[in-house]
Amino acid sequence: MRRVRESIVKLAGGQTLDTRTRIVAAAADVMRERGLSRATTKLIARTAGVSEGTLYNYFEGKEEIFLAVLGEQLPEFIALIRGFPDRAGKAQVRDHLLELAQAALAFYNQSIPMGASLFSETELLERHRAMLAQRGAGPHRANQAVAEYFRREQDLCRVTNRVAPSAPADMLLGACYQRAYWTQLMGEAPEPEDEVFVQQTVDAVLLLLDHKE
């Protein structure tokens, strides 16, 4: 775990991190290296340089830490999603979708390897599902937020209203997720390059929306 500890120091820029941030940063490294199922709270605490009891002062368990990692340690996607509907009517639709697709692809590329082991442990998966239900959270919230953005753009007549707003949302995020899955499984990104993929995918969604800029 020496490499993990060094990465936390580097993340801090030479400054001391507060305890909660140290725990989340340590968890991110452990989960990248071992996956969620093997990332025990004991190992996370040891990597962060705190006691396991201290860890539980901040989090109920590793499922809650995992959500913190997704929101705080990975590329900014969750924050972008939360405010995405409010972008309707502002700037260019294509620019918004390009930013969204780039953020989604980066987020999925890091989160898929971490969370894949959820499905290998029934009890862990059930606990994770229960926590998401309790918080009203889950991956579907991203699709809902993007669908709401498209609905608002339809109301403003910036895109066609002849398609359900959920369709372009599912197409865009689904394409990014599938590419990230393929990349992580095969160890390399498929053709074309990510930048070209993002542009082509956004253009396809805009074609569905009968949108020209």
Image (cartoon, grey):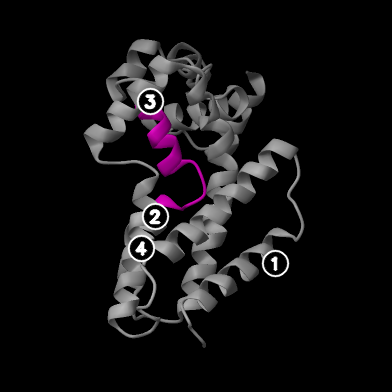
Amino acid type, residue under disc 3 in the picture: Glu
User: According to the image, label 3 marks what residue?
Assistant: 63
Residue 54, by quadrant, is: top left
Residue located at (74% from left, 60% from top): 193
What secondary structure characterizes most of the magenta part? helix
Amino acid type, residue under disc 4 in the picture: Ala
**Gap between marks 4 and 1, in whole Å?**
24 Å
Compared with residue 88, is residue 22 higher up or lower down, i.e. above or below?
above
- Which of marks 4 and 3 precedes in the sequence? 3
- Residue 1's spot in the image, x, y percent? 62, 18
The total number of labels drawn is 4
Residue located at (46% from left, 33% from top): 16
- Which of marks 2 and 1 precedes in the sequence? 2
Judge depth for marks 4 and 1 and give the one in front: 4
**Gap between marks 4 and 2, in whole Å?**
6 Å
> Is residue 192 in view from this perspective?
yes
Q: Judge left or right: residue 85 versus residue 110.
A: left
**Gap between marks 1 and 2, in whole Å?**
22 Å
Judge depth for marks 3 and 1 and give the one in front: 1
User: According to the image, label 4 marks what residue?
Assistant: 147
Amino acid type, residue under disc 1 in the picture: Val
User: According to the image, label 2 marks what residue?
Assistant: 143
Q: Give, as a single range, the part of the protein colored magenta.
A: 64-78
Amino acid type, residue under disc 2 in the picture: Asn
Label 1 element class:
helix
User: According to the image, label 1 marks what residue?
Assistant: 196
